[in-house]
Structure formats: C-alpha cells, structure tokens
Amino acid sequence: MIDGILGDYVDLASIFIVFGGVIASTVVSYPMDSLKNLGKLLGGAFKAKKVDFQADIENIVKIANVARREGILALEETVSEMNDPFMQKGIMLIIDGSDPELVKSVLETELVFIRERHSSGQAILLSMSSYSPAFGMIGTLVGLINMLRKLDDPSSLGPSMAVALVTTFYGVVLANLLFTPFAKKLAVQSSDECLRKEIVLEGILSIQDGENPRIIREKLNAFLPQSQISAATDTAQSEGAGREA
C-alpha cells in the first residue's frame, strides 16, 4: 500500500464486523431463493459473451425468408436447430397458429419476469453496497470507544485509531470496488439481454404477419445505434467483395 505495510491494513475484528454485518443484514433482508438466484445471475453476467445483435437480426431475416417462400409450417424443421429457448418458443407459437396477440402476450410476460429477476439481483447488490459503509462506521465507533477507554495509555491511541479507521476503509472498498460495480455490470448485461429479446419478439411478430424480410431487417435495425448498423453494413460489403474477387 502507499507508504505503508500491507499487514497494517489487515485486522480480523474489522473484517468480522464489516463482512459479517453485511452478510447478516443481506440474509435478513432477502429470502434465500433470491440470494441463490443472485449467484446464478452474477455467474451468467460474467460468463456471458457479448451479445451479437446483428447476428440475431440476420438469423431472423433468414427465418423470414424461409417462411415467405415455403410457409410458416416449414419453420418446424428449423426449430430443433435453434439454441435460443426464447426464439424457439416464439416460433413454435406461430407454427401452432396462435393469435398474434397471444404470441406477444406470452413472450412479453417472459420478458417482464426476466427484467424482474435481474432487477432483484441488482437491488440486493445495491443494498449490500449501502450496508458496507454503515458497518464500516459501526466498526469505527467500536474502535473509538475502545480507544477512549485507554486514554490513560497514550501509546495505545495511535494503534487503536488506526484499527478504527481500517474498518471504515473496508466498508468503503467493499461498496465502491465490489458491490456497486457488480450491480452495474449486471445492469448492463440485463439491458443487452432484454434488448436482444425485444428484437427477437418484434422479428417473430413480423414473420407471423408475413412482412417482407428486407422490411423486417430495417425494422429490427431501428433498435440498434447507427454505429452498430454501419459496422455490420461495412462487414457485409467487405464479405460480398471478397466473394466476387
């Protein structure tokens, strides 16, 4: 650490107060099922690859071309090849001849619950972020009380004050280096996943309506920033030039 020894920042009592207090408060505040889901959400957020929206759009356009040429029932052969349960569910609904409003309702309901699960995980992390400085301050108060009890021993004041401040240090570091960044990471991942599912939902409804695949592509590109659309267009043009060569 800066002009210090790393061991000076290690205090078992402070660790117990901050870590133990945060964990205890979180367990009391939330049901165990929510805490178990938090682990899964964090694992998924940090293992998940970057969402390729353009690949999803091109996949939907490809499906739309099949449906336009051969009919909706022809999509039954492609369902088994899909690795996206959300898209698979939507395609199966339109193959079964479900009403467009029913398809929209079913998929939107699933999307709502996905958002709720993710927001629940973010809320837990943000709560832990707020608990950390509070328990750091509690530890500091405990240290100050002990220090005041030993005012007759000036040599103990410095070490006692250092231990008291270390507890606040733990709380601030936990909040700003661990829990808050994790919550933001989960929020970004959740936003990307929900946007992807919104694109898939709109594409499935467009396929069911029998819209032109080119129109579907333009409609779905409207969900994305212009920079992503331009990058995808440049890539497609480069690939086309390579094939011509």
Image: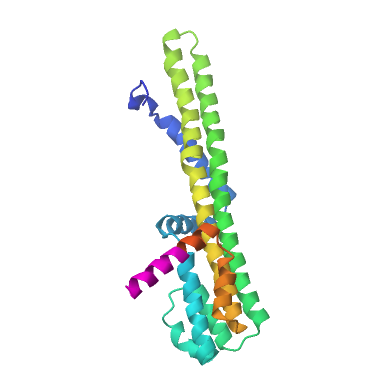
Question: Residue 177 or 170: which is nearer the viewer?
Answer: 177
Q: Residue at x 44, y 88 (%)?
A: 77
Name the magenta segment's main secondary structure.
helix
Q: Residue at x 62, y 76 (%)?
A: 106
Question: Residue 100 or 133: which is nearer the viewer?
Answer: 100
Residue 191 image offset from top left, x and y in percent: 55, 58
Q: Residue at x 51, y 90 (%)?
A: 69
Residue 78 image offset from top left, x and y in percent: 44, 84
- In the rendered image, the residue lying farthest to the right is 101
| Whether residue 52 can be seen here | no
Question: Is 196 located above or below residue 206 in the figure?
Answer: above
- In the rendered image, the residue lying farthest to the front is 245
Question: Is 228 located above or below residue 68 in the figure?
Answer: above
Question: Is 200 located above or below residue 175 in the figure?
Answer: below
The segment highlighted magenta reads 233-245
Question: Is 63 located above or below residue 241 in the figure?
Answer: below
| Whether residue 168 can be seen here | yes
Q: Residue at x 49, y 61 (%)?
A: 230
In this rendering, position of residue 242 left or right of residue 182: left
Question: Is residue 240 in the magenta section?
Answer: yes
Residue 210 image offset from top left, x and y in percent: 60, 84
Q: Residue 121, located in which quarter of the rendered image? A: bottom right
Question: Residue 211 or 123: which is nearer the viewer?
Answer: 211
Question: Is residue 5 in the magenta section?
Answer: no
Question: Residue 129 or 73: which is nearer the viewer?
Answer: 73
Residue 239 image offset from top left, x and y in percent: 37, 69
In this rendering, position of residue 243 left or right of residue 72: left
